[in-house]
Image (spheres, rainbow, N blue to C red):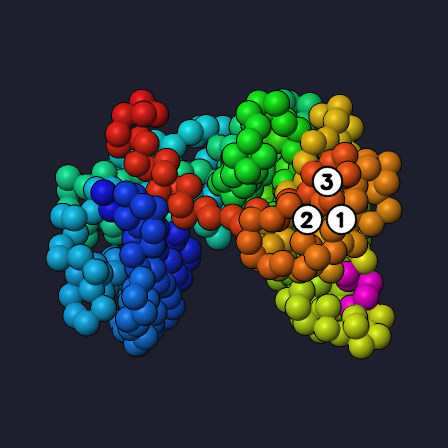
Amino acid sequence: MKILVVNAGSSSLKYQLLDMENEKVIAKGNCDRIGIDGHVSHKTFDGRTIDEDCSFPTHTEAFEKLVEVLTEGDASVIGSMAEISAVGHRIVQGAEIFNKTCIATDEVIDKIDSLAELAPVHNHPHALALRACKKVIPENVPQVVVFDTAFHQTMPPKAFMFGLPYEDYKNYSVRKYGFHGTSHRFVTAALAKAMDTDIRDLKIVSCHLGNGSSITAVDGGKSVDTSMGFTPLDGVLMGTRTGSVDPSAVTFVQDKHGFTPSEMSDYMNKKSGFLGVSGISSDNRDITAAAEKGDKRAQLASEMLVYQIKKYIGSYAAVMNGLDAIIFTGGIGENAADVRAKVCENMEYFGIEIDPESNAKRGVLTRISTPKSKVQVWVVPTNEELLIARDTLALISNELL
């Protein structure tokens, strides 16, 4: 059984085709620069590639190209789209409407689009892609939607509410939603399997660290708190995002620069974080290299990230009344051994002890804490596409109905 996984953005359409018999990727690629000019990059499991400019006025043309590269030419991997059992779509914001994976009916797509105000960069493009997919993919192929926010719907009100007047929650849905839920759900389940322990018996802090980062407290397999909030801007320092900031500092800086609210949002989302603090780059690898050469602002950016992650780990251990394991995942979490080591330094209170040799490994499932460490520390590579495919398969097989 083959599942196509789609992750649509405002100008891109990333995809993977998986064979669910062995959960291997058959082909993957990206149709990007939608609405600008257009480009497709496509790679098969055996190394055949396509890399060419195209015309993508809308997501519909991008889906048509996706179908073409999968079914025609030297880099095709299937005879027709009839070989695909379902399409699974990643959706960023499901708000309180969607707490589980579901079939993408026209009504569901309209509701996803109606949440665009809560995720303007993501939800409307998701809806456009879903509608485009329905035009191009055979009608009998189910469309399934998997929500990043769904995993965090188990947070209690004391964790997701803000100190604004309650009417802002009731009237405008202003609350913490959390993101990266698909990743946190995948890695915590993978960790429980690796530890040979029922996830219901584990208290885990999951650190998804990349250009966008979030930390989540997972108690018994359920999210009880997470660092990202109403939007993905909240939490720890990120590539170009501020992370948590005193709201009065926001209005103060906005006034000083004479920014509109939209300009201030752009300033905090695209010009801050590693980039704003270091003045060098939004990429942690560049920050690390500059810090090693003695650049003070790069060193500061690195120290801020490590310090903030430590604070979340400590606070979430308190929230869960214990801590069994810490997970590092995402581009930084899986590959930056220095970040992992520094986060786990000076945490003797938790009985954490890192094995330098294990910690030196990159991008593989590895326990990086010593046998004596009271809290286990693991690197767990994330695979959101595989989880979306699994959810999609389970739903169409009636396992989630």
Region of the chain picked out in magenta, as a range: 298-302
Question: Based on the displayed image, in which of its 4 quarters is residue 202 positioned?
Answer: top right
Q: Is residue 15 left or right of residue 92?
A: left
Going 41% across and 57% down the picture, which residue do you hit?
A: 10
Which numbered dot is residue 371? Answer: 3
Q: Is residue 225 left or right of residue 308?
A: left
Vertical side of 152 occupied by 326: above or below: below
Residue 67 location in percent, x, y? 21, 59
> Looking at the image, which is closer to me, 397 or 105?
397
Q: Is residue 65 left or right of residue 327?
A: left
Majority secondary structure of the magenta segment?
helix
Going 76% across and 48% down the picture, which residue do you hit?
A: 354
Mark 1 lies on a secondary structure that is loop
> Looking at the image, which is closer to me, 135 or 14?
14
Do the residues bearing badges 1 and 2 touch, measured as CB atoms within 8 Å? yes
* Disc 2: which residue: 368
Which numbered dot is residue 354? Answer: 1
Going 25% across and 51% down the picture, which residue do you hit?
A: 132
Vertical side of 321 occupied by 46: above or below: below
Disc 2 marks which amino acid?
Ile
